[in-house]
Amino acid sequence: MLHRLMRALFYPSPGIDIGAQEAADYEAWLEGGLALYKLYALPYDPVRMLRYLATRERYLFHGSNNREIARFEPREQTLYSGKPVHAVFASAEPLWSLFYAVFDRSKLVGSFRNGCLAYGGKSYHYYSLNAATMRAEPWTQGAIYVLPREPFRRASSSKLRFDEWISEEPVEPLLRVDVQPQHFVFRDRVAVHGDREPVWQTWLRYKSRTSVTR
């Protein structure tokens, strides 16, 4: 029942079929270990590789416009629940991290809203900008950082939760993967909301606002 509601409001992560040869190629590439500036030279879209890493449940992901991060330091941030934390943020869903990698925060005017909700092994996404930000074409190149899962914990233990993970300790990334705006699979599913609009209204109208681009 809840899955049906989530699908009615938001977009699920698209399915991905990784064949035996592709998986073997990833494993062979990983055998040498991960390194921050290890060159990704496989013939597959790098997002597919990141999604493959996600299935191994050893890694988390952090997206940024900054391609020069060698160490993530905890800082004052706010969970979606409104709770303040001093932590490093990450997600188990690389597609959500992709938004933060290619969204140019320097072009933000007013508010932006987004999220990835996890429930029952599925992920559901929504992305919305205000009109001024959307007109600024706020997309840029960025990077996805692959982080070790060990120092992190889920920010919430609820069955339905935002896929936020936090670490109160500094974290050094294992790998950096450069990405471009075209890698963000939900780029044509970004809605436009009013700054004074309640968040619940953004949720209710999200699919109808983006369905014209489907």
Image: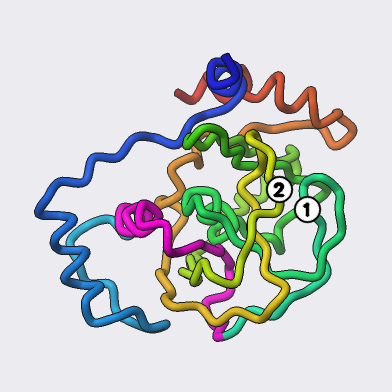
Q: Residue at x 72, y 73 (%)?
A: 168
Q: Nearer the viewer, residue 105 or 36?
A: 36
Q: Nearer the viewer, residue 11 or 88?
A: 88
| Residue 79, numbered circle | 1
Drawn side of residue 197 relative to residue 105, left or right: right
Question: Above or below — where is 21 with respect to 174?
Answer: above
Question: Above or below — where is 63 with respect to 80?
Answer: below
Q: Residue at x 78, y 74 (%)?
A: 75
Q: Nearer the viewer, residue 64 or 91?
A: 91
Residue 190: name its quadrant: top right
Q: Quadrant of the C terminus?
A: top left
Residue type at the position of mark 2 = Ser
Q: Quadrant of the N terminus?
A: top right
Residue type at the position of mark 1 = Leu
Q: Position of residue 152 (x, y in %)?
A: 61, 66
Characterize the local packing of mark 1: few (<14), some (14-19) or many (20 or more) Cα atoms within 10 angstroms.
Answer: some
Q: Residue at x 71, y 63 (%)?
A: 106
Q: Position of residue 11 (x, y in %)?
A: 52, 29
Residue 7 is one of the magenta-drawn residues: no
